[in-house]
Image (cartoon, rainbow, N blue to C red):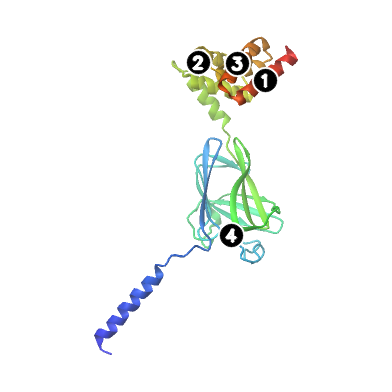
Amino acid sequence: MNCLGSKLILIFTFISIQGFAQINTPAASPSAMLTQTLGLTKITVDYSRPSVKGRKIFGDLVPYAKIWRTGANKITSVKFDDDVLVNGAILKRGSYGLYTIPGKSDWMIIFNSDDKQWGSYGYDIKKDIIRFNVQPIQPQEFTEQMTIDFVEFTPTSAFLSIKWESTEVRFKIEQKVEEKIMAEIAEKTSKTEVTSDTYFSAADYYYQKGIKLDEALGWANKVLEKSKEYWTYQLVARIAAKQNNCIVAIPNAEKSMELAKKAGDDAYIKLNQLVLSQCKKTY
């Protein structure tokens, strides 16, 4: 074969190899991204989801007592837009690698400052930020494809759940927001010009917390002075009812009820019924 023929064969071989390399197929462990608002912050979990495929997972494919990337491919990462508490420990705003050490009766959860590792091959214990232990539980259903999700919500907390095969572990993440909210209320309500929305939100927050109800009622009355709607009457009514001040609560609830019925707002009708029910017991 002459030199030109050899070169042509090499060129076609290279093109063929390149062609095969560019074929796209579904990922065995597809990537997933989970975003959740918690309190006043946002949490983002970026991970890959391996499947069981008939294999024994924990204690075999994923050995006990060894560091695991908590998924497949790149290390699972968890990003917090603000400081949070994880299992009661402060974790500063930022992105972290989520490693785990599975065990038959005990798992170690690890948040590491390096969130860029491919797998756990370059894991460095010196970069661990927090470590804590949790006990695995057996979920009601078998999980074929590893799943990370948030469960057991409150307005300021949730548990991060990791499920795969017949095992689940979960741990609590929370944000302490009360101090921040109280500071914002103090700042915004002390300004020379305050909007009705600010007074409404501040009064409702105090009502929900059951604190400084005299101040909350004053703000609610300021809202009502500017806007006589069924929801503004109802704000005054429910705060007054919580103070057992039914002389104020009843007429405002009745007016709110009248307007809510005209608007066909069943939710506010029920809220007013609750206020009137509370007051008829004490008034």
Number of the front mark, 2 or 3: 3
Work out whether 54 lies above or below 274.
below
Q: CA distance from mark 1 to mark 2?
A: 22 Å
Number of the front mark, 1 or 3: 3
Q: CA distance from mark 1 to mark 3?
A: 11 Å
| Sooner in the amino-acid sequence: mark 2 or mark 4 | 4
Q: Quadrant of residue 258?
A: top right
Number of the front mark, 1 or 2: 1
In contact (CB < 8 Å): disc 1 and disc 3: no
Most foreground residue, 93 or 19 = 19
The amino acid pointed to by label 2 is Ser
| Sooner in the amino-acid sequence: mark 1 or mark 3 | 3
Q: CA distance from mark 4 to mark 1?
A: 55 Å
| Sooner in the amino-acid sequence: mark 2 or mark 3 | 2
In contact (CB < 8 Å): disc 2 and disc 4: no
Most foreground residue, 250 or 107 = 250
In the drawing, what numbered circle is on residue 273? 1
Relative placement, left or right, of 62 versus 27 is: right
Measuring from the top left, give residue 139's x and y in whole percent.
69, 53
| Sooner in the amino-acid sequence: mark 4 or mark 1 | 4
The amino acid pointed to by label 3 is Glu
The C terminus - image quarter: top right
Residue picked out by circle 3: 258
Relative placement, left or right, of 282 versus 191 is: right
Q: Quadrant of residue 147?
A: bottom right
Residue picked out by circle 4: 68
Query: For the image shown, how many numbered marks are present on the structure?
Result: 4
